[in-house]
Image (spheres, coloured by chain):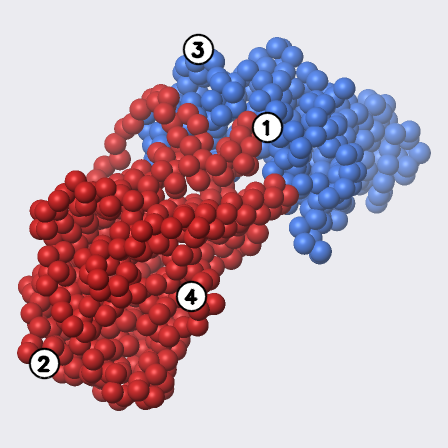
Chain colours: A blue, B red
């Protein structure tokens, strides 16, 4: 059994708007699963279907072994949720909201609550309306993490946090992972996803475009190289691991499979490199490929490094 | 004048934002007035001999003077007596909501921050809100006047009549300008405006009830409390009789002074804050908060307190005035016939006053149940339902609060009336017993409307707010207060839950209609629950 098993999920809003188009998503027990995709791809809709707030039009959705639409209340005792846009009651204090949400979920651990308030440096006596966006998010995070549950659904939980709090968040999630909890983490912060997630699913236009471990995904990503040499570069096209090569005399642009990079460098040294720009296989590149509307390769200058030869 | 830089631009923005809502308010009110005027014109052109005695009824009867004044026999004046209070309350609410929408709401939602960061003066948003509200009231005055002209009334009286309603809107434009500075939330600013409206109504009602009637029984000179209220000023314009313009000056003067106060307040506070600093609160929730019902209680207890204070005040006043009813004679007593007959005039008075309170409590219940929609559209519902709370439990939390709140309110009112009524007439204990019974029989009708609101929220969520209020206004107008005198057919009267409320204590309580109302409430409620369990939630993106 999986923590989350979604297959062929379809969700329409009216006759012309298909928010989810046969989405597949699997989250194993004990894993932190990254859920990525451009704005409007359907991440929040998916999570709301998982919470039983929206009804699936087609497909199979199993959450913690149950049907989230029919067994919402029983399942919600076993999960905690942090929404992307934290809408709370402006005239209650942070402390009151944490207690309330914890209690509605079936109770929270008071010691853990105090510890998290300390770690997130949140003042629980202020009214929700006087909190900044980041502090409202902390309220939701403390409320969720104070609960002893099996599954955490986090919808862009750190979009308003400062780097220090981001680090605290990552620590807490690491602790939960070590403790064997399952987490679905929707996020745009790639360093966070890279640091925390065992596997990721990238969603685009309501479908899962890619799913797997980072190793799985990374092997799909090639390093882009722009190079100028003293000797002509005609031989580039013949090297193994080189793709999409465009050669103009002593100038060439191509991409290289991650495993072939070393061999390619050896070849290039023979041709006497004058300048060379490489775009390493960043996650960002991978995501850009999926986020871009046309699905084309990202621009090569992103995250580029310039190495100038003497 | 640099504080007003950008006002013109913001007025255009406000007009653009309000291009649907303000015309809807104005056309709705004009349409309502045109329809009722035509109805009365119709019936009195068939029986012109009835106009004078009918006018005497509403002049001589202090209970009827709560609604407003009539001066001399005229169809227009008689119509305005029936409609003026409703229209005045609507004009005040239109103005308060318009001003708050462009000032405090803008601040609360963070829009003001973006505007104020531009080349925009400190007072520009306030000025824009006030200007738009005043424009709306000018248009309202003209449209109401035209509505009565179209229905065959004299032009001058019609225009004065329209102005007498818009006058209230003008005064409350100033009130809202101030409340928007005092409160730090939209709800608070609107609520304060509503509280002032309640006081204004009470003063006008009290002044008219205590007023003196001339020898021909066709004219009331109001007592001084009426002169403290914008609603009273509107009535003192005496459309279709004296046709006075000058009370309008009172409203304009008050509006200008209040706007001046608001400008001073703007200078003394931070954007996004009210006049009072945000206090710290509890670090831990009290056990009473830790349930959906406890949460709803917490969120609405302030509003409930305001309602309780208001009903307490009205109860005390209406109770104290009961000895005036006992002295009534002749045609003035006819109106009470519908509430239990002339044999027990005072009982009929109690019954009618209790029904008015029942309708007021219905307003409270409708407003509370509409928070269901607010929870959903504002997104605060999401964290609740994402916890182990079923939709049914969420609904039940509101139903329990509504029932408890409505019971409390109507009992407070009954107790207050029994207290002063008992002092005026004697027999407090038995009066209290009778009035508690009369109070409780109002609740099934109120519950039917509450259940109907829930059904609208679950079946037609996007339209539910407007439709719910429309349903309430409809129920009041085809109900016993207005329906019979409008000559509406029985089947239409029977559509209002209020029609089925027993006229206790004038008439012994019969349980069949109450049982019918409870049954209707359950049926409508079950429909709501079924619909709610099946549908998607419409949460903000």
Q: In the figure, is residue A73 to the left or right of A240?
A: left
Which residue is label 2 attached to? B216
| Residue at 29 percent of width and 40 percent of height | B408
Q: Are marks 3 and 1 on the same chain?
A: yes
Q: Residues within 10 Å of mark 3 (few under 14, many from 20)?
A: few
Location of residue A47 (image quadrant): top right
Same chain under badges 2 and 4? The reply is yes
Q: Nearer the viewer, mark 2 or mark 1?
A: 2
- Neighbour tally class for label 4: few under 14, some 14-19, many 20 plus, Cα within 10 Å: many
Report whether mark 3 lies on the same chain as mark 4: no
The answer to whether residue A99 of the structure is visible from this angle is yes
Is residue B538 something one can see in this rendering?
Answer: no
Give yes or no for contact between labels 2 and 1 (Cβ–Cβ under 8 Å).
Answer: no
Real-space Cα distance between discs 2 and 4?
A: 34 Å
Is label 1 in contact with label 4 (beta carbons under 8 Å)? no
Mark 1 sits on what residue? A73
Q: Residues within 10 Å of mark 2 (few under 14, many from 20)?
A: few
Separation of marks 3 and 4 at Cα, in angstroms: 61 Å
Name which of mark 3 and mark 1 comes first in the sequence: 1
Q: Chain of mark 1?
A: A
Q: Which residue is mark 4?
A: B493
* Quadrant that contains the N terminus of chain B: bottom left
Discs 2, 3: same chain:
no
Mark nearer the N terminus (2 vs 4): 2
At 13% from the left edge and 44% from the top edge, which residue is drawn? B427
Q: CA distance from mark 1 to mark 4?
A: 43 Å
Q: Looking at the image, is mark 1 or mark 4 nearer the viewer?
A: 4
Q: On the image, numbered disc 3 is attached to which residue?
A: A111
Where is residue B301 drawn, in percent x and y? 31, 38
Mark 1 is surrounded, within 10 Å at the Cα level, by few (under 14), some (14 to 19) or many (20 or more) other residues, namely many
Position in image of residue A104 (x %, y %): 49, 25
């Amino acid at each position: 059994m999986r923590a989350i098993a979604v297959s062929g999920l379809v969700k329409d809003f009216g006759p012309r708007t298909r928010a989810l188009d046969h989405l597949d998503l699997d989250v194993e027990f004990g894993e932190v699963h990254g859920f990525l995709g451009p704005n409007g791809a359907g991440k929040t809709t998916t999570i709301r279907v998982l919470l039983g707030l929206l009804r699936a039009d087609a497909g199979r959705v199993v959450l913690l072994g149950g049907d989230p639409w029919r067994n919402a209340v029983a399942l919600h005792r076993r999960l905690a949720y942090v929404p992307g846009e934290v809408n709370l009651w402006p005239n209650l204090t942070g402390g009151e909201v944490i207690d309330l949400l914890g209690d509605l979920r079936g109770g929270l651990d008071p010691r853990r609550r105090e510890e998290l308030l300390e770690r997130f440096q949140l003042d629980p006596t202020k009214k929700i309306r006087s909190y900044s966006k980041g502090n409202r998010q902390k309220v939701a995070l403390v409320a969720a993490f104070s609960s002893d549950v099996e599954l955490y659904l986090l919808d862009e939980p750190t979009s308003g946090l400062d780097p220090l709090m981001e680090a605290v968040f990552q620590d807490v999630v690491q602790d939960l992972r070590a403790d064997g909890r399952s987490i679905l983490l929707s996020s745009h912060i790639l360093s966070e996803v890279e640091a925390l997630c065992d596997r990721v699913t990238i969603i685009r236009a309501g479908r899962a475009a890619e799913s797997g471990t980072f190793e799985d995904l990374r092997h799909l990503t090639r390093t882009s190289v722009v190079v100028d040499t003293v000797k002509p570069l005609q031989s580039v096209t013949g090297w193994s691991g080189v793709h999409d090569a465009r050669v103009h005399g002593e100038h060439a642009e191509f991409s290289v499979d991650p495993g072939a990079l070393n061999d390619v460098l050896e070849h290039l040294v023979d041709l006497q490199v004058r300048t060379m720009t490489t775009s390493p296989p960043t996650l960002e590149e991978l995501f850009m490929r999926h986020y871009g509307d046309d699905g084309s390769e990202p621009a090569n200058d992103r995250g580029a490094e310039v190495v100038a030869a003497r | 004048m640099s504080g007003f830089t950008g006002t013109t631009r913001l007025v255009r923005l406000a007009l653009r934002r309000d291009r649907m809502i303000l015309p809807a308010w104005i056309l709705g009110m004009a349409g309502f007035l045109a329809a009722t005027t035509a109805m009365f014109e119709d019936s009195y052109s068939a029986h012109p001999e009835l106009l004078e005695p009918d006018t005497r009824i509403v002049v001589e009867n202090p209970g009827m003077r709560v609604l407003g004044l009539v001066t001399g026999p005229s169809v227009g004046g008689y119509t305005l007596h029936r409609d003026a209070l409703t229209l005045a309350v609507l004009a005040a609410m239109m103005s308060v909501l318009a001003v708050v929408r462009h000032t405090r709401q803008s601040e609360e939602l963070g829009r003001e921050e973006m505007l104020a960061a531009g080349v925009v003066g400190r007072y520009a948003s306030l000025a824009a809100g006030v200007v738009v509200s005043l424009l709306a009231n000018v248009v309202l005055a003209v449209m109401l006047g035209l509505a009565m002209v179209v229905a065959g009334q004299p032009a001058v009286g019609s225009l004065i009549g329209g102005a007498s309603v818009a006058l209230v809107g003008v005064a409350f434009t100033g009130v809202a300008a101030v409340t928007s500075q005092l409160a730090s939330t939209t709800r608070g600013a609107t609520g304060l405006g509503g509280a002032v409206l309640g006081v204004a109504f009470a003063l006008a009602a009290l002044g008219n009830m205590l007023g003196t009637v001339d020898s021909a029984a066709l004219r009331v000179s109001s007592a001084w409390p009426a002169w403290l209220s914008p609603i009273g000023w509107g009535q003192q314009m005496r459309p279709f009789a004296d046709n006075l313009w000058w009370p309008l000056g009172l409203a304009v003067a008050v509006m200008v002074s209040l706007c001046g106060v608001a400008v001073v307040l703007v200078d003394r506070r931070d954007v996004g804050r009210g006049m009072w600093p945000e206090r710290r609160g509890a670090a831990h929730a009290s056990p009473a908060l830790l349930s959906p019902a406890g949460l709803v209680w917490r969120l609405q207890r302030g509003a409930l307190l305001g309602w309780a204070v208001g009903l307490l005040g009205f109860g005390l006043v209406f109770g104290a005035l009961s000895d005036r009813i006992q002295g009534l004679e002749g045609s003035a007593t006819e109106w009470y016939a519908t509430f239990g007959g002339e044999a027990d005039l005072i009982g009929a008075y109690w019954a009618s006053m209790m029904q008015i309170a029942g309708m007021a409590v219905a307003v409270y219940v409708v407003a509370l149940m509409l928070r269901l929609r607010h929870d959903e559209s504002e997104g605060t519902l999401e964290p609740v339902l994402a916890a182990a709370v079923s939709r049914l439990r969420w609904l039940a939390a509101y139903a329990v609060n509504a029932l408890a709140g409505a019971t409390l309110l109507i009992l407070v009112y009954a107790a207050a009336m029994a207290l002063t009524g008992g002092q005026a007439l004697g027999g407090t204990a038995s009066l209290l017993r009778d009035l508690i019974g009369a109070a409780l029989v109002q609740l099934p009708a109120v519950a039917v409307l509450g259940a109907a609101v829930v059904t609208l929220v679950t079946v037609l969520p996007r339209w539910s707010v407007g439709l719910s209020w429309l349903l309430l206004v409809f129920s009041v107008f085809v109900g016993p207060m207005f329906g019979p005198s409008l000559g509406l057919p029985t089947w239409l009267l029977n559509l209002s839950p209020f029609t089925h409320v027993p006229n206790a204590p004038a008439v012994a309580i019969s349980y069949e209609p109450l049982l019918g109302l409870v049954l209707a409430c359950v049926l409508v409620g079950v429909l709501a629950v079924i619909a709610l369990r099946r549908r998607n939630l419409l949460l903000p993106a």
